[in-house]
Amino acid sequence: MVGIDSSGSSGRAVDPATGAAVVPRGRDVRLDFFRGLAMFIIFCAHMPGNAWTLYIPARFGPSDATEIFVFCSGFASAIAFGGAFRKYGWGVGCARVLYRCWQIYWAHIALFFTILAVVALGTFHLDTGKDYIGQLNLYHFVNDPARGIIHLMTFTYVPNLFDILPMYFGALLLLPVMILLSRVHVGLAIGFSLGLWACVHAFGWEFPAEWWANENGDVRPWYFNPLAWQLLFFTGFAFGAGWLKPPPMHRLVFWTAVVFVVVQIPYEFWMSRRAIDAHLMESFGYTTAVMNDLHQSLRWFTQKTDFGILRYLHFLALAYIALYLLRGHENKLRAPVFKPIVKVGQQALATFLAGLVLSRIGGMFLDVAERDMVTWALANLSGFALLIAVAYVAGFFKGQPWRKTPAAKSAPAPRPESAPPYGAARFQPGAAD
């Protein structure tokens, strides 16, 4: 992590590992753009019965929008919290992180009860015949709220759909530890992150997501294990803090990343799996679905819960490809056509929360209406528009316009009878050109 240079009078930020001065950076439009894209994809992916999810990036490879969200959150955390640790020390930096955790915690609780209210309204007041409470497996909480509220508030009850924010919360809590380790040596912090991820896979470290056991006596773990996903979070943090340097933009590396991504499409994309297996069975008499079996055999390497290694490598390859293609064209993302996406990325927490609620409502709309090309487009595009509206409203309130000094009112125009002689107005202070 960067520190404050106390040897001189300039007070410049320096990297304690190298002693090099750290140049302050503005907001990276690429960060906001890709985080905005992730918010749109997450909205689509969580809408039940949404045919558009058949073609989101997650269908073409092991990584998906979650990786974008987590990596960008780590990168943004280096910018947002790094200044507090540099300027005010470790204690104040910890307080800054805990304040953000406090916000994430109550955002999670509010999201749970908001969606619970939405699915309850849909279950009891929509004539669809569907049990939306049961779809999210919330009846244990509904039937035993006294016990449920205790486990909800202590993160020992983390239902599916409500698991990304707790994972983010857990990664943030590790940040002060990483800062301390980095003050000894940056390599020690990076090694700690890698070692923690390895321990998850070696020893099965996890957190319970429910207070009851299934028929086999097993308790479901958090769907996103923060002890594993912190690896991606702190990869983003390491690049944002300058612990790691971005790899050089080289054509050979670019094409290697492209090949790595492309070779996974045949067994990851559902249409290609189906087509290849049908061809092998028809033309060569295969009795098993080869591509589907290959897809299943790699599940351990592509799993979400403990963040399989192929997910990590696939995301890094995609990130390199994106950076390579955008090299020298970054400012094009500031074009008016991209401004709504960038705005959504700037207000990621608000749009994430809104997206999960809107995805439930969109799914109910599709249940009421007939699912076809028109209704799918209407549900998705209206959701996109609402996410953009939420981003602009959140940005307005976050800017706290009521705290700004109001602009001075223009002086009233002089009356004709008291107007100065012709030509004199041009010499008056504030006169129009």
Image (tube, helix red, strand yellow):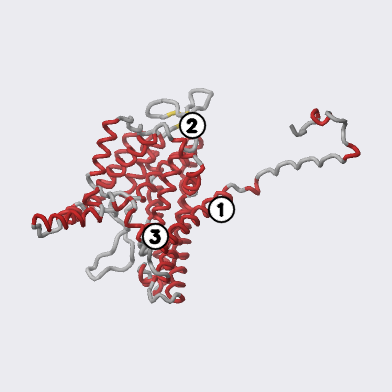
Image location of residue 181, percent across then percent down: 36, 38
Nearer-N-terminus badge (1/2) = 2
Q: Secondary structure at mark 3?
A: loop
Tag 1: residue type? Answer: Val
Measuring 22% from the left and 50% from the top, which residue is drawn there? Answer: 266
- Viewer-closest of 351 and 101: 351
| Mark 2, other Cα within 10 Å: few <14 / some 14–19 / many ≥20 | few
Q: Which residue is mark 3?
A: 162
> Residues under labels 3 and 1: Cα distance?
24 Å
Q: Quadrant of the N terminus?
A: top left
> Residues under labels 1 and 2: Cα distance?
29 Å
Tag 3: residue type? Answer: Phe
> Residues under labels 2 and 3: Cα distance?
35 Å
Q: Quadrant of the C terminus?
A: top right
Circle nearer the viewer, 1 or 2: 1
Residue 393 shows which numbered tag? 1
| Mark 3, other Cα within 10 Å: few <14 / some 14–19 / many ≥20 | many
Q: Identify the image quadrant of residue 257.
A: top left
Q: Secondary structure at mark 2?
A: loop
| Name of the residue lying farthest toward the right | 417
Circle nearer the viewer, 3 or 1: 1
Q: Which residue is mark 2?
A: 24
Tag 2: residue type? Answer: Pro
| Mark 1, other Cα within 10 Å: few <14 / some 14–19 / many ≥20 | some
Answer yes or no: do the residues labelled 3 and 1 have beta carbons within 8 Å?
Answer: no
Q: Secondary structure at mark 1?
A: helix
